[in-house]
Image (cartoon, rainbow, N blue to C red):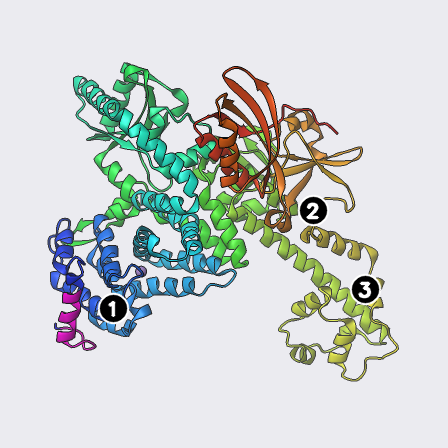
Amino acid sequence: MGAPASFPPAELALAVEHACAAGVPDADSLIARIRMYDPDVDADRIRRAYGLAAAAHHGQSRQSGTPYIAHPVAVAEILTELHLDADTIITALLHDTVEDTVLTSEQVRAEFGDDVAMLVEGVTKLAQVSRNRGSSDQAENLQKFVLAICEDVRVLLVKLADRLHNMRTLAHKPKPESRVRVSRETLEIYAPLARRIGVQRLCSELEDLAFQWVNPSAYETITRRLDDERATRREAVFQVSDRVAAALHDAGVSARVFGREKRAYSIWRKLERRGIEFDDLADIYGFRVIVETVDDCYRALGVAHRVWRCVPERFKDFISTPKPNNYRSIHTTVVGPDKRRVELQIRTEDMDRIAEAGVAAHWRYKQDSYGYDPDAAQRAGGDPLRRLRPLVEILEHGGDPDEFLENAKLEMFTDQVYAFTPDDDLIALPSGATSLDFAYAVHSEIGDRCLGAKINGRSRPLRTRLRNGDVVEIICGADPAPHPGWESITVTGRARSAIRRLIRRAHRHELVTLGRLIAHSAFHRHGLNLAEARLNDALTRLKLDSEEALFFAMGDDKISGRDLVDAVYPGRARSDVDDTLDRELIPPDAAQAFVRNRSSLETGGAPMTGPTLTPGISLHLATCCSPLPGDRIVAIPGADGARVHTIDCDALAALEDTQDDWIDLIWSREATDKAVSIGRITATVEHVKGALAQIALAVSESHGNITGLRILERSSEFFEMALDVEVFDVRHLSNIVAALRACPVVVSAERAHGGEEDEE
Ligand code: MN
């Protein structure tokens, strides 16, 4: 076949020549890369795709000034590193053509077939959504995204490679605020999606690139520390590798051992979560031990533990219990040569490839052709796309896009906890998940009907946070029962969205009942009978499609009793009947039910709300835990109103027997959006000159504002202090805590929990 009809051969040749003259790698170099893993690749087809892309983008350039074709070629190269098939590489070359050039989807189909056309369309659709930036378009974007991916994961792989190259060249974007916006989107959506399908290699580069724009000061602090460490520890790293390899060799295990520096962003996340000491080698370097068989993994582990003492809390066996994205490896930290803590990751060559490439590791030769091998994926531990399914489920049940985004982010951000059903099925949940989350993860119907839970055989409140290895048995009632307060004790998007759906349904049911009562009352007072009325014509007139919709609209105060009488019997509504009475005439208990439900759904601007909260009760924030927006909270009623604690506050332990009186609360949207709260941090700091200045700088660089500072204890070497800082929410606070931990003078820093008496 020759060149496609849309471009004359001379134009094609010129475009290709122009690209190569500007330093863009040519088609042959791309083909050579593919041949490394697929020797039979149809080189001509790749060459044609290259030519077509070059011609279509001819005359366009990137913000850096290079010809546009450099971008699709770079995206294609990234995908060759993941050993993807020819159709994916061709899609990468063409991914921006249908969106930005004269080329049409039909031309792509005629030239490269249905698969490529479908893939290009998938990527194009995503690009179109992300380009129109409305208020909730990030949310819509993600929705489309997840749906497209579930049709063919290659769409996601191309999109991730596309994003990676755009991140690598982000410095060329002229506006700093758009660099930050793109980076934030990368951290919140693209990197977590990459992790979900196990493509660690893309994920960690995306995170590191985004991190430097989103939090430049933290990035700089950490990379500076890493540079210092690298200079002083080079020798140590080689020594450790050699010693580990020698010990394994002596025991007859053949292994490849090498040290890998951890990524700045992953170090930052650890600083955020727990106070690691920066000078621990194990926190900066991980040592890979690659062996031949699964058996060898355990033998290598045995050798390591025999030669060096292990640090028990850091031992993890992801071979017997793989992560849901199929990651398998043994992690152990030992007190290694020269008493240095050393982290070892022991795995086979195969596991290593899956750890790096995830779902992409399963493209290989099978029966003469190169493609995705679902059997291999299955053997490696199952379909990684399974992890996207909860998101799809949220999509299918509707709800607004922003809600979806909030849920999806929540699900993807957090780390995992693994719990089991009584039948030994593994349920992976984000850490912090409760037994109620567990119930919803098993099945939404189980969640809806959930009454209680037994954890490891003992009855426990539904709000109990699960720990790794818990066996959870859910006790169900016969019927679904909506509990608006449940939302505050769940963390998974899946549970939250199901609970909201259940409440909406119950709410709708009550409004329909109320509407029906209003209709009866209105007809009655006009001397008419609703039972005899023919509602069909009226429905058409009111543009409604069912009686249920009619009564719902009436219950919701959208249509009055008079409107309905007017619609059924035009001209008969009597002007002397006051229809505001309709609402007052309905039976009092129906009205109460209505009002009760209302108050649980609307926040009315209060910072926090709860379904069983008595209106007018005064709420005080407990000073032992100082809850912040984003914390899970509960109110304990007392003599002078109720005191609001975080759900994990130590003070609650003493109050467990009053649990039935606890009031479940959630923060209102206003609280999380606008208000500024005070968070308290305690820190131990080296007693050196300029220490306070460093701390103040770290806080202000994290956009915090110190409102109070007290020295709690002072010695010649250290002082301990309490800082009150204005923050937006709990995430903001943990960000500041992490920034403090990154300061060289800070020995430890953490959010204050208890310790001080409630002063009120
Ligand atoms: Mn692109």
Q: Is residue 711 above or below residue 324?
A: above
Label 2 and label 1: CA atoms lie apart by 58 Å
- Residue at x 21%, y 55% (from the top left corner): 85
Mark closer to the observer (2, 1): 1
Q: Residue furthest bottom?
A: 571
Res 469 seen here:
no
Who is closer to the viewer here, 444 or 353? 353
Residue 583 - label: 3
Q: Which span is picked out in magenta?
A: 3-18
Who is closer to the viewer here, 51 or 520? 51
Mark 1: give few (<14), some (14-19) or many (20+) Cα within 10 Å.
many
**Which quadrant would residue 41 be assigned to in this image?**
bottom left
Asked if marks 1 and 3 touch (Cβ < 8 Å), the reply is no
Q: Which residue is mark 2?
A: 611
Mark closer to the observer (1, 3): 1
Q: Is residue 600 above or below residue 43?
A: above
Three-letter amino acid code at the position of disc 1: His
Residue 575 - label: none
Q: Which residue is mark 1?
A: 57
Label 3 SS: helix
Position in image of residue 754 (x %, y %): 62, 26
Mark 2: give few (<14), some (14-19) or many (20+) Cα within 10 Å.
many
Judged from the image, the quadrant occupied by ligand 1 is: bottom left
Three-letter amino acid code at the position of disc 3: Arg
- Residue at x 36%, y 37% (from the top left corner): 264
| 445 in magenta | no
Position in image of residue 409 (x %, y %): 47, 48
**Which quadrant would residue 182 be assigned to in this image?**
bottom left
Q: Earlier in the sequence, mark 2 or mark 1?
A: 1
